[in-house]
Image (cartoon, rainbow, N blue to C red):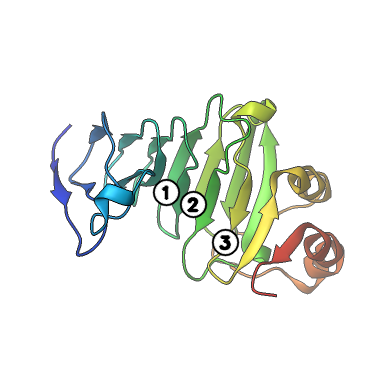
Amino acid sequence: GTGGFHLDFTDGGAPGADASGTGNSLTLRGSVPQDTDDMPETTGVMEILVATSGNDILGGTDGDDILAGGAGDDLLTGGAGNDRYGFARGDGADQIVNTGEGGSDDRLVFGDGVSQDQLWFSQSGNDLQVSIIGTTDSVTVQNWSDVNDRVAAFETSDGATLAAAQVDNLISAMASLTPPALDETELSDSLHDQLDTVLAASWSDSNS
């Protein structure tokens, strides 16, 4: 596709790849120390790939990756390690491939302004789809039915955490309900009545 990418060396942080344009495909072949100010004592690695607009393919390797596709319909593959997948309003319809990551602390992290009661969970075949209500934005974790291909948890920016083991409760509760229509970004009173109990039981507050 068009566009390209450049290495972004942030002050005191790890190098990462920053893609712009459309149709980018980035794969990190190596790894970098997490703490560039203290390289001799650092054993961990972190790989950061952040794309902008367009339909991108981002692939990490061994190590702890941070992958965020930005706007467009992106494919994110973390590989081994404890990976973080970022998804925000306006990011389109992203796909996550977390193959063979059973036991890793992989997490899907939602951007600012996305709260736990604005996420709609559904299963499509073997995949898990999480949609931001009132929008066309969604992120799909492929092959969710295989426990080795799941992310360990979901996080919102306000500190709420949903463990993978709790997801089926939300899928079941939402399966018989109709999500809010486009541009309705809050649950109706009726949906709150039907979902508040399971939401409170499933999500935990990491700030408490």
Mark 1–mark 2 Cα distance, whole angstroms, equals: 5 Å
Residue 140 shown left or right of residue 16 in the figure: right
What is the number of the mark on residue 137?
2
Q: Which amino acid does label 2 sit on?
A: Asp
Crowd rating for badge 2 (residues with CA inside 10 Å; few <14, some 14–19, many 20+): many
Q: Residue 49, position in %: x, y?
A: 30, 45
Q: Is residue 39 above or below residue 99?
A: below
Would you say the residues marked 3 and 1 are in contact, meaning their CB atoms lie under 8 Å apart? no
Splitting the image into 4 quarters, where does residue 182 fall? bottom right
The mark nearer the N terminus, 3 or 1, is: 1
What is the number of the mark on residue 71?
none
**Most foreground residue, 42 or 45:** 42
Q: Residue 33, position in %: x, y?
A: 29, 46
Query: In what element is the residue under mark 2?
Result: loop
Splitting the image into 4 quarters, where does residue 118 fall? bottom right
User: On the image, numbered disc 1 is attached to which residue?
Assistant: 92
Would you say the residues marked 1 and 2 are in contact, meaning their CB atoms lie under 8 Å apart? yes
User: On the image, numbered disc 3 is attached to which residue?
Assistant: 134
Q: Is residue 68 above or below residue 62?
A: below
Q: What residue type is labelled 3?
A: Gly
Mark 3–mark 2 Cα distance, whole angstroms, equals: 9 Å
Q: Which residue is located at x 76 percent, y 43 percent?
A: 165
Quadrant containing the C terminus in the rendered view:
bottom right
* Label 3 vs label 1, nearer the camera: 1
Residue 187 shown left or right of residue 82 in the figure: right
Crowd rating for badge 3 (residues with CA inside 10 Å; few <14, some 14–19, many 20+): some
Q: Would you say residue 10 is visible in this rendering? A: yes
Q: What residue type is labelled 1?
A: Gly
**Most foreground residue, 43 or 79:** 43
Crowd rating for badge 1 (residues with CA inside 10 Å; few <14, some 14–19, many 20+): many
Q: Residue 66, position in %: x, y?
A: 39, 47
Q: Which residue is located at x 73 percent, y 64 percent?
A: 204
